[in-house]
Amino acid sequence: MSPWIWCLLLLRLTCEVRAQVENRVVFLLGTFQNVSFSQNETVQAVVSRIPPEVAFITLQFHTQHRNATLSYSRMPGLGLSLTAVDSGLLSPLLPSQTSLSLFLSSPDGAVVAGTGVILPYTGTDPVPGACNMEFNLDIDPNVYLHYNLYETTIRFAPANIGYERGATPPACDVSTGSDTRWRLRYDVYQYFLPENDLSEQSLFSAVETVADVQGVTENARLVLTLSSADMTEAVFSSIPGQGVIYSVVVRDPLENSSASYIPVHTYACSFASTLDGCMTLGKISTKVFFTITGLAGLFVCFFGHRFFKCELFCMGFSFAAFFFFVLITRTTTLDYDIRLSLAAVIGVVGGVILVMSWWRFGSVMACVVVVGLMLGFLLASIVFFTPLGDLDVFRRSDVVFWVTFCCIMLIVPLIFVRWPREGNITTCGAVGAYAAVLAVNAYIYTSLSYITLNILKRFLNTNFSAAFTDVPLQSVDFALISVWAVLGVSGVVLQLYRERSRPFFPPSPYLMWRQERERRKTNVLDPSHHVPSLPGRLLARARQLTRRAEPAGEHTPLLL
């Protein structure tokens, strides 16, 4: 064989060896490793020098929005692989096993970049997903997440108690004694990413923070604890554009041990959508609507009581638009923009009706009651925005929730009966300033919008009562709370000072017109008594316009 052929064969062998090395990633136990691969590439994840006390390990791999496939073999197959954004596999170890290989690949024909880690567990630690009867994997340590506009639901398979290498796994459902899996408890945790941060770096840093049991318990917030008799499911309120990581830790109280399921994350929006995805969150119609609402809110905050008709129109608009939007959303399948437009039209009608009712009948108290309901609605929404809203008594019973909500809402109008002017000015300041905060939310995400949005979701979605609605307050929220407080207090103080020497409320224009008309009828000395009526003046003006013009010249007889 010629030397050239030997050189070509040696070069080919070198390239194959180099390709195998490039497609092989060595993991260290408990250490994160960044991995990237393309469509036709399968990466072998290898871990070696596994201590003998380790009974099983989990490999978890996270990407921001692209699917990745984890498999036990180089060729993925049903029951031997999982494709997801947050995926994981659990591998029990043989008695003498010191190394393990798992495989990563891209199912969608795109370059996938993510971060992964292999975590070890001993024989006393519970085995996440070992009693799986619902999902494809035999042992499934994954948390499965589904979200829509209203709620985010997570589900996971039950765990089993731990066992040593080579031992037979304990039976899952033979009995419910204290020596079976029924003694296990499941802690569900929630970890929020920084607001308005959709970067991959922020996500990977957060995943590293809550990947294991210690990180979850120290940094995440415990939402609820489930027993083995409960459904392995939890429901949360969706927050589009806000990154959230959900983690489940299974605990064995008898062995005082624990293990972590594979954390899962969501932004409650799509990175693939070009119309209304995470990067373009917020429709133009929503921004226009809430920008106008915010400007009107600022006007009401500082000048609402002075311009009483404008205040009544804004309150009537808000009241009618909100409830009509709820009505058409529950009863129709119209597009969002159409529903928002119809709600705005009905809001205008509601505002006009409220103004005309005051103009015609002059009942200030009736209008103040409507205004008080607006402040009562906001106050009740704030109460249930706090952790009080996540109490089981309100989550499990819609009747208890709505009765409590309505009682808080109705207290405010009762107070307004005693102090109508002060109550009306307070409503102008609080509600008007909050409308300005909602306008800011159309451009920059803030958790304060969920004060009223959670109530709207509960109106629109029958099953939303089971969702946890507590959201974190971050730096943007604290800044906007300060702005809300400053605007509200400034508006109330300014209006109280300006209106201190004026009548409590302006008189009704219709009643003033009737009183003026009666005065002109009875007072013959008043020059306005001899002024023709409005129909008479209009008829005289019409006759002047249609009468033929007289020719110019002298028409009177000459005086002698």
Image (cartoon, helix red, strand yellow):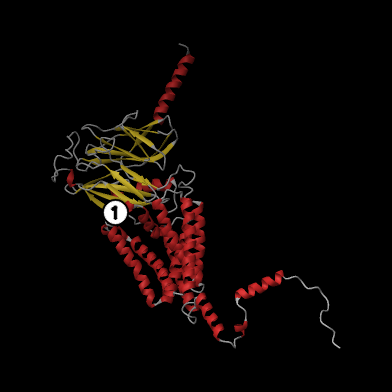
Which residue type does callout 1 highlight? Leu
Residue 437 in the figure: left or right of residue 150: right
Task: Report whether 560 appears left or right of 367.
Answer: right
Q: Give the image quarter of residue 418.
A: bottom left
In the image, residue 423 sits, relative to residue 57, either above or below, namely below
Q: Where is residue 104 in the image (x, y as percent from the top left)?
A: 37, 33
Residue 59 shows in the view: yes
Q: Position of residue 159 (x, y in %)?
A: 23, 42
- In this rendering, the answer to whether 9 lies above or below 373 is above
Q: Is 404 on the left-hand or right-hand side of 284?
A: left
Residue 192 located left or right of residue 318: left
Q: Can residue 193 be seen in this view?
A: no
Mark 1 lies on residue = 222
| Image quadrant containing the C terminus | bottom right
As helix, strand or loop, the secondary structure at mark 1 comes to strand
User: Residue 28 sits in which quadrant?
Assistant: top left
Q: Which of 504 and 230 is in front in this view?
A: 504
Q: Is residue 371 shown above or below 187?
A: below
Dot 1 alpha-carbon crowd within 10 angstroms: few under 14, some 14 to 19, many 20 or more: some
Q: Position of residue 505 (x, y in %)?
A: 47, 77
